[in-house]
Image (cartoon, rainbow, N blue to C red):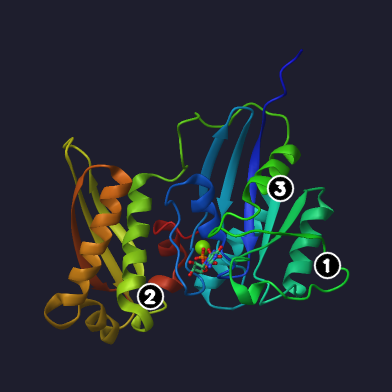
């Protein structure tokens, strides 16, 4: 008997901010590739997570939350969503049942199906009590309940995705986990640590620029990163009294980066005032956000 054909393709994980896209990506890969937070618009770039199984390679593309706004950073983020939707082999549209199915979902769904791209719609966070009894509007596509927390619906989701991908050889070696360099992922972990340490005080426009990533030594990776803020007052908040805050960000980030790299890490952080970083397309690009 002939073996089942190998399938491979790009699955864009799409949805509003905070729908649980990055959490799902990490759960599916069993590795923390994408940073997660309770704040909307955590993801600022496309990250490909590569899941290789016997007869299928699924390239999960995490995307920023779709969100209408005129701010240049948002415009750049929405462009990433648009191009992911235009290029994927399958759209996985995640919907938080509390927010419900809206015009934005309808539009995205229509765009994908118009070019013949299969779409799977999933309701996320179904482990939460208040997500269980949400009424779904008549006429909305069938949805599949999933939870990255309890694992509900995840294996079935993978099987459904695999069945709909094109017949193709693998695109990447089976042991490769992401298309993003470790240098970029390390910067993202610094950004996540800042989210956690700063809480409500987090400036909306905080970016991390990894200016040095030195792997010359086998047992120690040296990283220097700048935390960019737009205002002098924010610089003071991120530094904290006597440098306490940035120090805590560094301790937390170093732990996470060491776990990712599997080596010791020397991490040096500098807080820098760069008033226009979020308004300059070139700068957004050099930071990996477009
Ligand atoms: N209980 C529960 N919480 C979840 C689940 N999935 C995500 N969350 C939480 O929801 C919040 C948002 O998750 P993210 O994965 O950052 O959401 P996102 O869609 O990537 O958000 P953006 O990158 O901002 O667009 C975080 O606090 C997660 O811990 C889930 O299955 N169950
Ligand atoms: Mg995200």
Dot placed on the residue nearer the N-terminal end, 2 or 3: 3
The image shows residue 141, relative to residue 119, as above or below, that is below
Where is residue 55? Give x, y as percent. Answer: 64, 28
Task: Evaluate if marks 2 and 3 touch, with contact meaning CB atoms under 8 Å apart.
Answer: no
| Residue holding disc 1 | 140
Query: Viewed as shown, does residue 253 lie left or right of 26?
Result: left
Where is residue 225? Give x, y as percent. Answer: 25, 60
The disc label shown at residue 201, or none: none
Query: Viewed as shown, does residue 231 lie left or right of 270?
Result: right
Question: In this view of the protein, which residue sits in the foreground, 12 or 274?
Answer: 12
Residue occupying image coordinates x 31% and y 62%: 190
Task: Evaluate if marks 1 and 2 touch, with contact meaning CB atoms under 8 Å apart.
Answer: no
Q: Please tell me whether mark 1 or mark 3 is closer to you in this view.
A: 1
| Residue holding disc 3 | 90
Q: Please tell me whether mark 2 or mark 3 is closer to you in this view.
A: 3
Instruction: Classify mark 1: helix, strand or loop.
Output: loop
The disc label shown at residue 276, or none: 2
């Amino acid at each position: 008997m002939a073996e089942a054909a190998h399938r491979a393709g790009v699955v864009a994980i799409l949805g509003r901010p905070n729908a649980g896209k990055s959490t799902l990506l990490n759960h599916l890969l069993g590795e923390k590739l994408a940073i997660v937070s309770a704040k909307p618009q955590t993801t600022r770039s496309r990250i490909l997570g590569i899941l290789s199984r016997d007869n299928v390679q699924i390239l999960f593309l995490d995307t920023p939350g779709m969100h209408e706004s005129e701010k240049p950073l948002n415009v750049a983020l929405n462009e990433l969503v648009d191009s992911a939707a235009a290029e994927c082999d399958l759209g996985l549209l995640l919907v938080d049942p509390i927010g419900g199915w809206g015009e934005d979902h309808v539009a995205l769904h229509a765009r994908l199906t118009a070019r013949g791209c299969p779409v799977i719609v999933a309701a996320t966070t179904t482990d939460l009590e208040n997500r269980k009894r949400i009424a779904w509007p008549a006429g909305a596509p069938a949805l599949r309940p999933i939870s990255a927390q309890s694992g509900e619906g995840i294996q079935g989701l993978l099987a459904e995705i695999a069945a709909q991908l094109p017949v193709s050889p693998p695109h990447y070696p089976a042991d490769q986990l992401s298309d993003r360099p470790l240098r970029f992922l390390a910067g993202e972990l610094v950004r996540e640590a800042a989210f956690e340490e700063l809480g409500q005080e987090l400036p909306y426009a905080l970016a991390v620029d990894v200016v040095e990533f030195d792997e010359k030594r086998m047992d120690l990776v040296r990283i220097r990163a700048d935390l960019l803020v737009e205002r002098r007052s924010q610089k003071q908040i991120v530094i904290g009294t006597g440098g306490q805050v940035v120090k805590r960000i560094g301790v937390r980030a170093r732990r996470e980066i060491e776990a990712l790299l599997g080596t010791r890490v020397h991490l040096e952080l500098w807080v820098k005032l760069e008033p226009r970083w979020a308004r300059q397309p070139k700068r957004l690009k050099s930071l990996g956000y477009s």
